[in-house]
Amino acid sequence: MDHAVVIGASMSGLLAAAALHRLFGRVTVLDRDTLPTVDAHRRGVAQSRHAHGLLAKGREVIDELLPGLSAELVAQGAIRGDLQRDARHIHGGHRLARGDSGLSGLLASRPLLEGQIRRRVSALPGVRVLADRIATGLLAQDGRVTGVRPADGEPIPADLVVDAGGRGSRTPFWLGELGYEPPREERVVIDVRYGTREFRRRPGDLDGDLVVIIAPTPEHPRGGVALALEDERWIVTMAGYGEGPGLALTEFADYAATLPVLDLHHLIRNAEPVGEPRSYRNPAGVRRCYERLSRFPEGLLVIGDAVCAFNPLYGQGMTVAALEAKVLLEAELRPQAFFRRIAKIVDAPWDITVGGDLKMPGVEGDPTPRMRMVNAYLERFHAAAAHDPELVLRFLRVTNLYDPPPSLMSPAALLKVLRGGAPRAVPVPA
């Protein structure tokens, strides 16, 4: 195979190119943005100014696709830490027990992470990353996509086109142009509103911890995260369902005081702010079910947020994109086989986010009986995990996409939860 074209120099697009360069003689990545020459925010990634989580599994997979990347990031200031020992996890209003998880996290700003990945991918043999190039349509013949039509310039022929164009993917529309049905969409309207500020990081902040994660609860549908970053900074992002924090420093601190615990309030009330505050709004989680289509043109794949855009509060998007990119190396590149493979990757994080979102006030939709059972069980699980590090490790292995969610209900875990959780009746799964 000679030439693959990737639409979008997003994280998913760059990681797809990192995989495809092992299979194709040439890989061309097209992006509509003017790409920065230094590590900087860019227009097409509006969320880059907010906290980003690279899960431990995602870091491992990215190091497989781009060997040595983690070490390069650390050399530029990224911070390693154990995801249980060096982090404060507050879920269901409970402060989870500490311990050594063996799960190695990597803390870096989105511009540093994306910038280093873009540099590495751009340097791969046969790979070109082209800025200011907008794809306006697909070339096709005899049921096969054969290239891309850019807004300016000559058509670009390709043996494979991968759409990594994010939430704004045009593939559903292009399928209609080619005589195919678009995929069915699952949509959960969440209306999550963010506010983010950065602060100077000082010795002794948070007693040396590197991460604070405060998950919202139905009683307090607000949450927040603080991540240590390069250049001795904290990035603090807080969000609520239907409303978010004010960006003025006093309003931001006051909002932190309404979270289920006061860790973020204590951190920022005397901290020195750095840079300008930013807001962001995420209206909905969206999944496009390509795996359910009976007809789809050969030579076209879709990946990343163009397939499933999660509620970003859960920090799963980059890791799912990395896992999907790895599938490009592991499976045949026929669309239906590829979409079935990545559906299995998407299923668990999608169920986690949707189940969590539907229990929040104001989120449209009714949780299924199974979701209600899981949510009730998780309340007991988090209560028990407040004093059981082994349960916390099980939870982190699920949220970091190592283990499937049912592992939280193994006989050993179930016994611990029912003995040590909050005194509330929970339906036990059959």
Image (cartoon, rainbow, N blue to C red):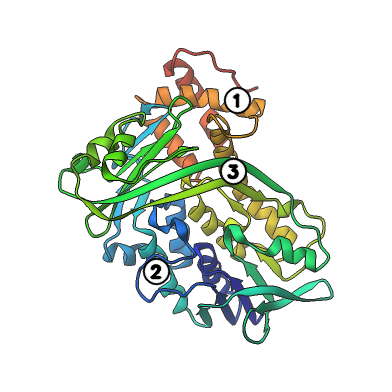
Above or below, 299 against 57 in this view is below
Where disc 2 sits, the SS reads helix
Question: Could you classify mark 3 by the number of other residues whose Cα lies within 10 Å: few (under 14), some (14-19), or many (20 or more)?
Answer: many
Question: What's the CA distance linking mark 2 and mark 3?
Answer: 28 Å
Residue 404 visible in the current orientation: no
Residue underneath mark 2: 115
Above or below, 123 against 278 in this view is below
Q: Quadrant of residue 97?
A: top left
Question: What's the CA distance linking mark 3 and mark 1?
Answer: 16 Å
Q: Quadrant of residue 28?
A: bottom right
Q: Quadrant of residue 36?
A: bottom left
- Identity of the residue drawn at 44% across and 68% down: 66
Mark identifier at residue 372: 1
Mark identifier at residue 350: 3
The x and y percentages for residue 168 are 61, 60
Question: What's the CA distance linking mark 1 and mark 2?
Answer: 41 Å
